[in-house]
Image: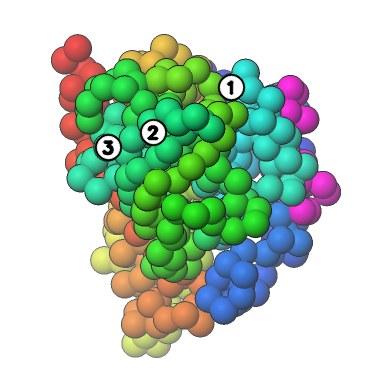
Amino acid sequence: MDFTLTPEQQLLSDGLTKFLDTKYDLNASRDAAKVGAGWQPEIWRSFAEDLGVIGAVLPEAVGGADGGPEELMVVTEALGRAVVIEPFVDTVVLGARLLARADDKRALAVAEAIAEGTALTALAALEDGSGGNLNHVATRAERSDAGWVLNGAKAVVTTAPLADHLIISARTSGDVGDRDGISLFLVDLTEGAPDGLQMHAVRTVDDRRAADIVITDLHLDADTLVGAEGEALGHLELAWDEATAAVVSEAVGAMRKVFDDTVEYTKQRQQFGQPIGNFQALQHRMVDMSMELEQAVAAQYLAILTLAAPPEERAAAVSAAKATISRAARFIGQNSVQLHGAMGMTEELAIGHYFRRLTVIEYEFGSADAHLARFAKLAQS
């Protein structure tokens, strides 16, 4: 199988990597995360207008370049290498790509705004006790004279405090756990959270913004329904698998950077009159890290190249990749910190920020145990 990038894909990779190397300052991004707006709007505009990386993975119908999984891999790996905090996966993969599949004027308009770099979205899909299952939806949507009334709660919705629009999954029929009866609703947040929607914002360990959401008698117009009523789960699962594959690629980018920096550090750090990289025990450790990285790259290719496969094959490949990545992220992240010594955990050293992001990726979109369980279930079916 040929994994060589096309000239266009290589140009996309080179352009984004060069931009991030020269324009994306780690300290500025962390300041924005900790005491600023939580992201850098000027960087996001450059992604959309100057580099075209947002449109690169969106269909032509919403102003994109109609890129596929390979373009998604190229972009997210580069973003991971620079530990970018801007919400690409939440807004573009879980937002625009999901909305673009709906034959719905309002959803398409928001997807077009994302492609232009003028909107952010967040997906509120998981709930307490769901175990990562998208069909575990207790939030309910009831019809009213004006449209819909929603009640329920969503847990740890990343990017929600920054978003202009919120995509909420709610049950319009059936019981918790049923595959049928789940619908999506698009809530406008451009003028703040509407009555009936409360956000409890937090900053995550990897410096991102998230919120727990409580929905109490939230009144929505009829046109906020995205797509066909009760038929959203298949679209949700596809978007979730795409997002999982995206963070797999992001993790590969981050792990490449961490590994390279760690090897370079061991060449410079002196102990007992020689570089610590000369010690055989540490060389063995770095060989183990290299092997984990190579397995992670293979898992990345498996997930990306199977996104267009039938649902069960896609889900099995993505789960296998995520379980592999979760193990590699833990091993490489922890060993890189150990090889750097105590300063590996400090705010001043880049390795600490990469470690925290890799720790979150280990559990984001499902832990290794959850994905191993899903893989085993799919293998038996």
Q: Is residue 233 left or right of residue 165?
A: left
Residue at 77% from the left image edge and 42% from the top image edge: 116
**Mark in the foreground, 1 or 2:** 2
How far apart marks 2 and 3 lie (CA) works out to: 10 Å
Q: Residue at x 32, y 39 (%)?
A: 139
Q: Residue at 36% across / 54% down in the picture? A: 214
Q: Main secondary structure of the magenta part?
A: helix
Badge 1 amino acid: Ala
Q: Foreground residue, 351 or 96?
A: 96
Q: Is residue 372 magenta?
A: no
Residue placed under numbered mark 2 in the picture: 141
Residue under pointer 1: 102
* Residue denoted by label 3: 138
| Quarter placement of the C terminus | top left
In this view, the residue in front, 261 or 50, is: 50
Whether 370 is drawn above or below 331: the answer is: above
Q: Residue at x 40, y 64 (%)?
A: 200
* Location of residue 99 with respect to 257 vertically, above or below: above
Q: Amino acid at mark 3?
A: Ala
Q: Residues within 10 Å of mark 2 (few under 14, many from 20)?
A: many
User: Mark 2–mark 3 contact, CB under 8 Å?
Assistant: no
The secondary element bearing badge 2 is classed as strand
Question: Considering only vertical position in the picture, is 207 above or below 176?
Answer: below
Which span is picked out in magenta? 45-63
Where is residue 107 shown, x and y percent of the image?
Answer: 63, 31
Query: How far across and how far down the image is residue 307, in percent?
Result: 48, 23
Residue 329 coordinates in the image, percent (x, y)? 35, 53
In the rendered image, residue 47 lying in the magenta stretch gets the answer yes
Pick whichever of labels 1 and 2 is earlier in the sequence. Answer: 1
Whether pointer 1 and pointer 3 mark residues with C-beta atoms closer than 8 Å, the reply is no
Label 1 secondary element = loop
At numbered mark 3, what does the secondary structure look like: helix, strand or loop? loop
